[in-house]
Amino acid sequence: MDKNNSTSTVEKSTFLKVYCSNHTISTSLGVLLNGYLILVIYKCTRRSNQQVNLILMASTLNDLMFSLFELLLQHVIYQSDGIMYIISYGFDQNVGSNLKLILSCAHYFALIQVMTMQAALHSYRYLIISQERPPTRRDFIRRYILFSIPSIYLSVSYSVSAYYGLKHSVSHYTKTLPTAWQNSDGSNNVSYVTLWSDPATKFYVFNNVVVVAALFDTSMFYIYKCYKHVNTGYEKVSASTQKMRSQFNRCLISQTLVIAVLALIPSGIISMTYALQLHGTYLGAPSMMGFAWFGAINALIPLLYMDAFRNYSIRLIFCSKQVEIDNSVATTRSLVSVS
């Protein structure tokens, strides 16, 4: 952080107060709700539904990791005229450049992993319903590792862009930083900048768009295959089993849609305005303010929509002496086999 940047606690501008308050509230809720959901999934897991809950557990762990990084680092992103400012109000604002680069890489991995893992989750769901034998945890781990490779690749690509960004003089590029993005005393908390003119940045953005789009299309492909596969036998199952199937499948698909609306679309908007080098004081701010909420919203979906999770929470809240799970005899395969 350059010497003109704030290294002590100073009052933020009104806009930054609203932005950071929204960020703190959303990510704090994300950490609390996803942490609680992990407990609920663990308590509600039985032999008959362990593969199903494995999918939800993996999704929840990804959301928890994202929310935790967002809460600890408190990054605010502003970009205009082909310059992206990474403004930090969290743990990394006063650390050295090497640690800052490591944290940026880990932070980006936590973010991109949420998006890329959707393909792994839906492919595993298809594996459950398309073969006779129940899949093992090894099958899931294999998919998790396979679909983590693009996340690692994109994180390294981002790190190269951030590495060159850390070499740029922050004080030079913050001369034109709008007042709304500064502290009340005129200082700023810009940690580093990345420039569209850097070849590494262009390479990273291009990779990000292509890889994430390909993996999202993969998710949609497996959602469609699951839908086509399961509806062939829909009339052969009971109404109660159909209800449980629908709850799980719609829950998982809803989480994917939330990520698309609150993460993929805002990322696409930021990438487009960055590449076009558009000018604006609040360019992309509304999208990024909604971006921080997807971890909390994704945790609420299964807590409210899944009967077993909701009933467990109600009994826990009202201090029921017998907090038991409604254990149906439905198998894992029957639970996931209808959209």
Image (cartoon, rainbow, N blue to C red):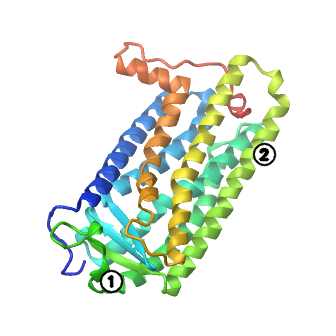
Q: Secondary structure at mark 2?
A: helix
Residue 135: percent from left, percent from top: 70, 41
Quarter of the picture containing the C terminus is: top right
Residue 51: percent from left, percent from top: 62, 37
Would residue 310 appear left or right of 71 to someone viewing this image? Answer: right
Measure how far apart labels 1 and 2 are at the Cα level.
49 Å
Can you see residue 45?
A: no
* Residue located at (31% from left, 80% from top): 176
Q: Are marks 1 and 2 in contact (CB under 8 Å)?
A: no
Q: Residues within 10 Å of mark 1 (few under 14, many from 20)?
A: some
Under mark 1, the amino acid is Tyr
Which residue does the numbered mark 1 point to in the structure image?
173
Which residue is more in the foreground, 202 or 325?
202
Would residue 141 appear left or right of 180 to someone viewing this image? Answer: right
Residue 105: percent from left, percent from top: 43, 69
Quarter of the picture containing the N terminus is: bottom left
* Residue located at (72% from left, 39% from top): 128
Query: How many labels were placed on the picture?
Result: 2
Location of residue 255 with respect to 306 vertically, above or below = below
Location of residue 105 with respect to 339 vertically, above or below = below
* Residue located at (32% from left, 56% from top): 19
Which residue is more in the foreground, 275 or 321?
275
Q: Nearer the viewer, mark 1 or mark 2?
A: 1
Location of residue 263 with respect to 176 vertically, above or below = above
Query: In the current view of this chain or complex, which residue is farthest to the right?
Result: 232
Instruction: Place residue 164 in its image quadrant.
Output: bottom left
Under mark 2, the amino acid is Lys
Residue 200: percent from left, percent from top: 51, 83
Which residue does the numbered mark 2 point to in the structure image?
225
